[in-house]
Image (cartoon, grey):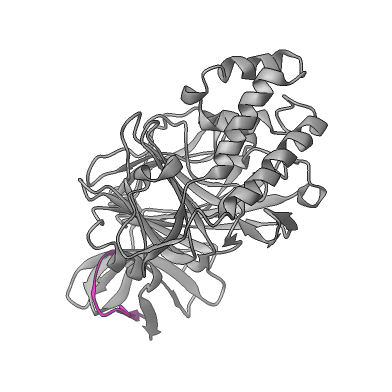
């Protein structure tokens, strides 16, 4: 029995290295199958172990086509041929906590499990990411990461730094083959000062396809409800993707949202936090080697890693007592709530990409969107995001002095805005001029219909 699958592009366009998944009504046990398109091109299909049962078998494939194409499963791949198939390759990792480093055919990326040491270099997530098309490395130092999630567990209310720096994840292999690598991270969020956020666990699914210019992820967290920035937060999180170009250099220097960007510039909260750091280092009566360590590290605040500011007020670090954290952060919150809503910071509406490094604090907070981009004007390199539900807000930072760039799904005062369980597809490449079309393709994946 053979199976033919009709694959149709709902946008009726041209797809290049497009992942597709389909299910046939039969139990096919072999991991890899040959297939051919209606115009005679060979395609490898990988059996999805987690999605197959005794009655049906699911497959993943990557192919290029225009409009629509028929794909016919033919025969299983012979065991002797598996080793010579083109596909995702594992490379030697660079970080001590590297779980896997992959050459996907589009990216060279390193997925790390973290070390829970509380530094930028101890984060789990993607800690190195290089586009194979342009050879450009977006995270050369390994001191930042793509894929961390933060609020509501990383907020002034909670007194807790972000989980990527203070937790280790276990990584489960869900699918492993030449077409698709699917990993699932499992972690526990360190307890902060809010009782309703204690004892929470999370999982994150990551999917990388051979040759595809994008990857996919989804975050799941134990149910929670709390108040951040004076607002109820019910099962919403901040996902943060970081990039680094080095001092004076920006990986991306523009931001835009599909349909136009609605934003306010500046981050008064960050200013209040910095001022409180300076006051604490100068005036706190805290003692002990940990406080002295932070005092030394923060003696030159303009060159200190930004995460040091948060760590000073982190319950996990125990630099300060819980009471002192609560008292100092209560003052920061009170002033920040006022400053964030002053009418002097006007909302701006623009159809043009925003040059974030030229606005106050090199930061903007933009409104709801499901399709966004950060790109580099001169080179055209771009990162494009699509979320299956819109995030209610974004914080975008393009800080030229340090070279740090951030895409975060939060509003002002670290208020998380992305619903838990949302699918995120993220594309990287020379997309600055056609990013809207790329975002549309991320949303409208091909439709597969199986005929016996």
**Residue in the foreground of this view, choosing between 36 and 245:** 245
**Residue in the foreground of this view, choosing between 16 and 60:** 16
| Quadrant containing the N terminus in the rendered view | bottom left
Identify the residue at image location x=38%, y=79%.
Answer: 448
| Count of all numbered marks drawn on residues in the image | 0
Asked whether 56 falls inside the magenta stretch, the response is no
Percent of width and height locating residue 410: 55, 54
Identify the residue at image location x=23%, y=53%.
Answer: 430
In this rendering, position of residue 120 left or right of residue 333: left
Classify residue 73 by image quadrant.
Answer: bottom left
**Residue in the foreground of this view, choosing between 190 and 369:** 369
Asked whether 8 falls inside the magenta stretch, the response is yes
Q: Does residue 222 appear anywhere in the picture?
A: yes
Classify residue 71 by image quadrant.
Answer: bottom left
Residue 219's place in the image compared with 57, above or below, is above
> Which residue lies most toward the left here?
39
Percent of width and height locating residue 157: 72, 45
> Which residue lies most toward the front here?
344
In this rendering, position of residue 113 left or right of residue 246: right
| Quadrant containing the C terminus in the rendered view | bottom left
Identify the residue at image location x=78%, y=30%.
Answer: 324
Identify the residue at image location x=52%, y=32%.
Answer: 306
Residue 5's place in the image compared with 44, above or below, is below
Q: Does residue 117 appear anywhere in the picture?
A: no
Percent of width and height locating residue 407: 45, 50
**Magenta region, mostly helix, strand or loop?**
strand
**Residue in the foreground of this view, choosing between 182 and 406:** 406
Percent of width and height locating residue 219: 58, 56
Highlighted range, magenta: 1-19
């Amino acid at each position: 029995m053979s199976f033919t699958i009709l694959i149709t592009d709902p946008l009726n366009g041209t797809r290049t290295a497009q992942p597709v998944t389909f299910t046939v009504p039969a139990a096919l046990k072999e991991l890899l199958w040959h297939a051919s398109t209606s115009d005679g091109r060979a395609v490898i299909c990988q059996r999805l172990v987690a999605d197959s049962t005794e009655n049906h078998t699911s497959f993943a494939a990557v192919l290029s086509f225009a409009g629509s194409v028929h794909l016919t499963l033919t025969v299983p791949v012979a065991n002797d041929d598996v080793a010579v198939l083109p596909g995702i390759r594992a490379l030697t990792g660079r970080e001590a906590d590297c779980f896997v480093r992959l050459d996907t055919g589009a990216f060279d990326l390193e997925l790390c499990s973290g070390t829970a040491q509380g530094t930028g270099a101890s984060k789990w997530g993607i800690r190195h990411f290089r586009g194979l098309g342009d050879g450009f490395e977006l995270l050369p130092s390994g001191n930042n990461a793509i894929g961390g999630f933060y609020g509501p567990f990383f907020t002034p209310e909670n007194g807790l730094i972000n989980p990527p720096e203070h937790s280790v994840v276990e990584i489960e292999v869900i699918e492993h083959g030449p077409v698709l690598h699917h990993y699932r991270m499992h972690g526990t969020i360190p307890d902060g000062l809010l009782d309703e956020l204690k004892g929470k666990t999370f999982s994150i699914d990551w999917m990388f396809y051979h040759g595809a210019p994008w990857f996919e992820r989804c975050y799941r967290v134990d149910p929670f409800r709390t108040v951040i920035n004076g607002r109820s937060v019910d099962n919403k999180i901040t996902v943060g993707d970081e990039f680094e170009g080095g001092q004076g250099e920006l990986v991306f220097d523009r931001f835009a949202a599909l349909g136009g960007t609605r934003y306010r510039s500046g981050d008064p909260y960050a200013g209040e936090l910095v001022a409180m750091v300076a006051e604490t280092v100068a005036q706190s009566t805290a003692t002990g080697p940990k406080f002295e360590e932070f005092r030394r590290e923060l003696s030159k605040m303009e060159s200190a890693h930004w995460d040091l500011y948060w760590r000073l007020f982190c319950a996990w670090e125990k630099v300060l007592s819980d009471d002192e954290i609560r008292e100092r952060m209560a003052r920061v919150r009170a002033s920040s709530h006022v400053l964030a809503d002053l009418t002097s910071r006007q909302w701006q509406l623009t159809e043009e990409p925003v040059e974030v490094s030229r606005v106050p604090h090199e930061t903007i907070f933009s409104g709801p969107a499901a399709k966004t981009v950060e790109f580099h004007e001169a080179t055209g390199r771009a990162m494009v995001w699509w979320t299956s539900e819109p995030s209610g807000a974004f914080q975008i930072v393009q800080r030229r002095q340090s070279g740090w760039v951030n895409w975060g799904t939060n509003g002002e005062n670290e208020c998380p805005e992305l619903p838990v369980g949302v699918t995120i597809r993220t594309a990287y490449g020379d997309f600055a001029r056609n990013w809207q079309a790329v975002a549309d393709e991320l949303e409208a994946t091909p439709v597969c219909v199986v005929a016996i």
